[in-house]
């Protein structure tokens, strides 16, 4: 389980770093992203992170997760 948690955390960090890198590159190219779009992107990233956490914890939840 410890190895799965470390792998999950590394994956989440890579997901966040990819989003930050994409936003930075677009900013360097002169493409301005509206604040509302950035909020929506971060909400989507948070939902993906929650999905990954639930999938990682599900085998060890003992039946209380659907």
Image (tube, grey):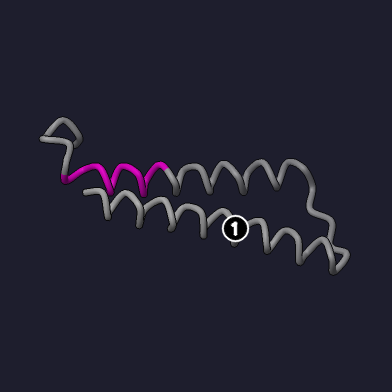
For label 1, the SS is helix
Residue 43 picture quarter = top right
Residue of label 1:
17
How far across and how far down the image is residue 29, in percent?
A: 85, 69
Q: Which corner quadrant holds the C terminus?
A: top left
How far across and how far down the image is residue 12, in percent?
A: 46, 52
Residue 32 picture quarter = bottom right
Find the residue positioned furthest to the right. Answer: 30
Picture residue at 36% right of the left edge, 49% below the top: 52
Picture residue at 66% right of the left edge, 56% below the top: 20
Magenta stretch in the rendered image: 50-59
Picture residue at 40% right of the left edge, 41% below the top: 50
- Left or right of residue 59: residue 32: right
Q: Is residue 60 magenta?
A: no
Q: Is residue 55 magenta?
A: yes
How far across and how far down the image is residue 62, in percent?
A: 11, 35
Find the residue positioned furthest to the front. Answer: 2
Nearer the observer, 42 or 20: 20
- Left or right of residue 39: residue 7: left
Q: Would you place residue 58 above or below residue 13 in this image?
A: above
Picture residue at 27% right of the left edge, 55% below the top: 3
The main secondary structure of the magenta stretch is: helix
Find the residue positioned furthest to the top. Answer: 64
């Amino acid at each position: 389980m410890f190895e799965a948690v470390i792998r999950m955390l590394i994956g989440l960090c890579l997901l966040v770093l990819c989003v930050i890198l994409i936003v930075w590159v677009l900013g360097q190219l002169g493409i301005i992203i509206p604040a509302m779009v950035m909020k929506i992107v971060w909400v989507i990233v948070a939902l993906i992170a929650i999905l990954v956490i639930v999938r990682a914890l599900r085998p060890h939840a003992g039946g209380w997760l659907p």
